[in-house]
């Protein structure tokens, strides 16, 4: 157990160092691509923290991410960048606590639809506030250097991974799993199911908000359509499915491959991009029910000639 | 003072009266049987005690203080554990982790993971499932899954255990084993309320029996008294009990 832990921690530190030193040797496209990958990795892992074990499909990612955008825009230039990111995380946490307390009594598809509607609701509220109160359309955000953005999202990525690992290994990990398996039995076995769900939902929102605040600085102008884009809600779900949700490597792998494949298709086949992407997605969901990682583990087991070794 | 006491406990579902003003009590150390035809309101009564449902009227007290309105997890931590008529296990988790949920969250005092695991293993031993501790609970037989639910409930270290038809669907041998298990639970000083349709089992182990019919308590007494009760015989259509 402890050896397992130190190996994982060691690997994480090595990965962090490599990624941290990267901008010293290369620049331009690779760093930009990595920012994109890390952004989606944060969103996907944060999504998996709550929706993975509980099976509550949240589509609220764009709401918290967009909130981060707007926090960045509102406080842009008045607050130092790190503080801005923390502020976005804290706001997302508070909003998610409220939303969670209201909605986590809903189950299954009702919860998914509500969180979907939440994004539209927030988007339209912000639109109306801009139209009626501030009489503006969109806002400007002070930019941060590419390197600054890269390091910020890298740090948030490792914080997300760390939080996800701690939650999975703690008593809350078991509580979340049992809620996903049979919520009623979990409640009657002494688990405060409402609090456990709301707290985890809010924790996952922290990282979504932080990512939003960081990425907002990549744009000079944002508006509600850019900030609260529903793709931000759907893509992490697809990336998690694509990579596999059995452990934390899957979502990261899914986010990386998905983003990379998307980039290649977009540059090579700009007209057929969505068509090819759709086919890749359908094929992967049909034939890789446990994601890329599950497929790789299956192949690995066959190559070693092992029988039914537990994953 | 009774360990558990209900006064005028009622529950309606729309126009349907599932439990109608039932008074009941359970004393420390006894085994109370709850019988009655299908739809008599037995499981609903369990749901009211364990707070799966709020009562429409009436109060339930535990160790002298009212517990109506508390959430299920608090009821569990106070010392009232239950099993379910249709098993509700954590199918994809290993057997031992199922039980550990009880010992980790349900005892009412904060225990370490190591301590919770130790208790979980003890309870698995107690229900004779130790050999299956690492198997996903969903792969167990029905009889084993019912035992697993008992172990999970026991791991919360209850004073009162509500068993909802743990013998339904079991073979004769398995019923004997379940009866033996209940006897051993009582020997630990745990009070038991059991809903059961297996008559020879309920007559054999219960100190006292309450009979429900259409949500109303129609009889109460020792197994011999209940078996001789006219109303009870009527309800069971002259079935030999």
Image (cartoon, rainbow, N blue to C red):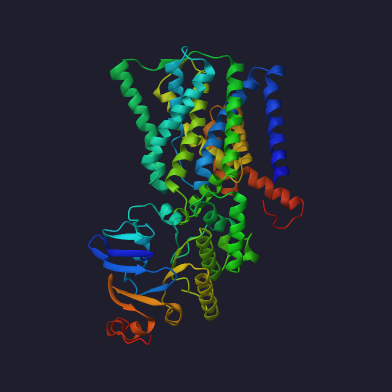
Quadrant (top left/top right/bottom left/bottom right) for the C terminus of chain B? bottom left
Query: Which residue is more in the foreground, A254 or B79?
Result: B79
Q: Measured from the top left, where is residue B10 in percent x and y? A: 27, 63
Q: Is residue B15 left or right of residue A228?
A: left
Residue visible at 54% across and 19% down?
A82
Query: Which residue is more in the foreground, A86 or A236?
Result: A86
User: Do we see residue A69 in this rendering?
Assistant: yes
Residue B143, by quadrant, is bottom right
Q: Measured from the top left, where is residue B66 in percent x and y? A: 33, 56
Quadrant (top left/top right/bottom left/bottom right) for the N terminus of chain B? bottom left
Return the residue found at the far right: A304
Residue visible at 31% across and 64% down?
B6
Residue visible at 44% across and 53% down?
A187
Q: Measured from the top left, where is residue A249 in percent x and y? A: 63, 39
Query: Which residue is more in the foreground, B135 or B217?
Result: B217
Query: Which residue is more in the foreground, A260 or B152?
Result: B152
């Amino acid at each position: 157990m402890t050896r397992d832990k130190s190996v994982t921690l060691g690997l994480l530190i090595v990965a962090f160092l490599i990624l941290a030193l990267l901008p010293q040797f290369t620049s331009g496209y690779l760093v930009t691509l990595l920012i994109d990958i890390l952004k989606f990795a944060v969103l996907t892992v944060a999504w998996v923290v709550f929706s993975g074990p509980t099976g509550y499909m949240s589509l609220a990612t764009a709401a918290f991410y967009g909130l981060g955008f707007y926090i960045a825009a509102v406080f842009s230039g008045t607050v130092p960048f790190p503080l801005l990111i923390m502020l976005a995380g804290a706001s997302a946490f508070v909003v998610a606590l409220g939303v969670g307390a209201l909605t986590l009594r809903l189950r299954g598809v009702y919860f998914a639809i509500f969180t979907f509607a939440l994004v539209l609701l927030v988007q339209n509220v912000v639109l109306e506030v801009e139209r009626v109160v501030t009489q503006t359309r969109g806002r400007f955000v002070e930019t941060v250097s590419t390197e600054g953005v890269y390091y910020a999202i890298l740090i948030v990525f490792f914080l997300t991974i760390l939080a996800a690992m701690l939650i999975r290994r703690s008593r809350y990990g078991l509580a979340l799993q049992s809620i996903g398996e049979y919520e009623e039995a979990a409640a009657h076995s002494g688990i405060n199911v409402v609090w456990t769900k709301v707290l985890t939902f809010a924790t996952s929102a922290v990282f979504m908000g932080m990512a939003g605040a960081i990425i907002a600085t990549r744009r000079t102008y944002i508006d509600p359509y850019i900030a609260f884009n529903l793709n931000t809600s759907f893509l992490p779900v697809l990336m998690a499915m694509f990579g596999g949700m059995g452990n934390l490597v899957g979502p990261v792998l899914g986010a990386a491959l998905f983003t990379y494949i998307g980039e290649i298709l977009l540059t090579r086949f700009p007209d057929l991009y969505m068509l090819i992407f759709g086919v890749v997605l359908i094929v992967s969901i049909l034939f890789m029910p446990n994601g890329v990682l599950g497929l790789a583990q299956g192949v690995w087991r066959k190559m070693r000639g092992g029988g039914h070794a537990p994953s | 003072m009774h360990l558990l006491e209900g006064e005028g406990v009622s529950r309606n579902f729309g126009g349907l009266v599932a439990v109608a003003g039932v008074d009941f009590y359970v004393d420390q150390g006894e085994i109370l049987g709850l019988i009655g035809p299908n739809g008599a309101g037995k499981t609903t009564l369990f749901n009211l005690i364990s707070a799966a449902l709020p009562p429409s009227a009436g109060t339930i007290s535990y160790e002298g203080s009212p517990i109506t309105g508390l959430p299920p997890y608090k009821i569990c931590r106070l010392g009232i554990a239950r099993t379910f008529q249709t098993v509700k296990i954590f199918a994809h988790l290993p057997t031992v982790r199922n039980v550990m949920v009880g010992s980790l969250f349900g005892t009412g005092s904060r225990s370490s993971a190591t301590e919770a695991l130790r208790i979980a293993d003890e309870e698995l031993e107690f229900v004779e499932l130790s050999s299956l501790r690492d198997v996903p609970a969903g792969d167990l037989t029905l009889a084993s899954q019912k035992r697993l639910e008992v172990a999970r409930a026991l791991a919360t270290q209850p004073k009162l255990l509500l068993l909802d038809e743990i013998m339904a669907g079991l073979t004769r041998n398995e019923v004997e084993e379940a009866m033996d298990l209940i006897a051993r639970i009582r020997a630990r000083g745990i009070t038991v309320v059991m809903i059961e349709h297996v008559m020879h089992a309920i007559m054999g182990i219960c100190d006292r029996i309450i009979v429900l019919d259409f949500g109303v308590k129609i009889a109460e007494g020792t197994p011999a008294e209940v078996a001789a009760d006219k109303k009870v015989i009527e309800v069971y259509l002259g079935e030999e009990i």
